[in-house]
């Protein structure tokens, strides 16, 4: 995603139907890929959570929302606005593949991925 979040914005403005958006920000910590305004849009659209391999901003406000948010760090700087990246593809970070359709179980300490029906049969 290279420090840009238009695809995150696009996704969170579509119906979430209780799903979790997984964002691979390449573990960049020099800008935030999610803030309170995008998170509020996600709540309004029915998203259950957002997992970011990167940074978020507005952490105090995010904690007040009925949306599970996990990220590597916080950073006050906004992201860029170029439409870079892909949607609805498998991502690999923290040594784990995540595919559309996988199930995520999360708490404050981390995420466990349970294979769903969206990835390759052997999940690589």
Image (cartoon, helix red, strand yellow):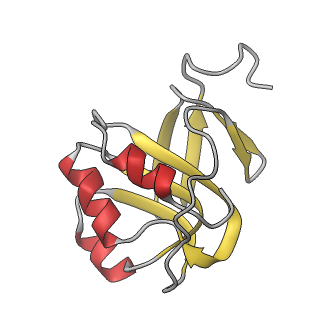
Q: Kindly give the residue lying farthest to the left in the view shown.
A: 44
Front residue (pair 5, 117): 5
The quadrant of the picture occupied by the C terminus is top right
Q: How many marks?
A: 0
- Name the quadrant containing residue 40: bottom left
User: Measured along the vertical axis of the image, is residue 64 above or below residue 83?
Assistant: below
Q: Kindly give the residue lying farthest to the bottom in the view shown.
A: 76
User: Measured along the vertical axis of the image, is residue 47 above or below residue 55?
Assistant: above
The reply, left or right, for residue 7 in relation to residue 29 is: left
Residue 78 point in image, percent of width and height: 49, 78
The residue lying at 27 percent from left, 33 percent from top is: 17
The residue lying at 48 percent from left, 62 percent from top is: 70
Q: Kindly give the residue lying farthest to the front in the view shown.
A: 82
- Name the quadrant containing residue 107: bottom left
The reply, left or right, for residue 77 in relation to residue 28 is: left
User: Measured along the vertical axis of the image, is residue 15 above or below residue 32?
Assistant: above
Residue 62 point in image, percent of width and height: 32, 71
Front residue (pair 75, 81): 81
The residue lying at 60 percent from left, 25 percent from top is: 115
Residue 61 point in image, percent of width and height: 28, 77
The residue lying at 52 percent from left, 84 percent from top is: 77
User: Measured along the vertical axis of the image, is residue 113 above or below residue 67?
Assistant: above
- Name the quadrant containing residue 86: top right
The quadrant of the picture occupied by the N terminus is bottom right
Front residue (pair 92, 104): 92
């Amino acid at each position: 995603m290279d420090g840009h979040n238009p695809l995150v914005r696009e996704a969170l403005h579509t119906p979430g139907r209780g799903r979790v958006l997984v964002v691979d920000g390449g573990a960049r910590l020099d800008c935030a890929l999610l803030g309170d305004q995008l998170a509020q849009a996600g709540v309004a659209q029915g998203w259950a959570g957002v997992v970011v391999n990167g940074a978020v901003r507005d952490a105090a406000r995010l904690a007040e929302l009925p949306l599970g948010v996990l990220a590597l760090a916080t950073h006050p700087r906004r992201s860029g606005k170029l439409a870079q990246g892909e949607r609805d593809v498998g991502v690999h970070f923290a040594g784990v593949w995540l595919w559309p359709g996988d199930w995520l179980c999360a708490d404050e300490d981390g995420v466990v991925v349970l294979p769903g029906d969206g990835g390759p049969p052997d999940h690589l």
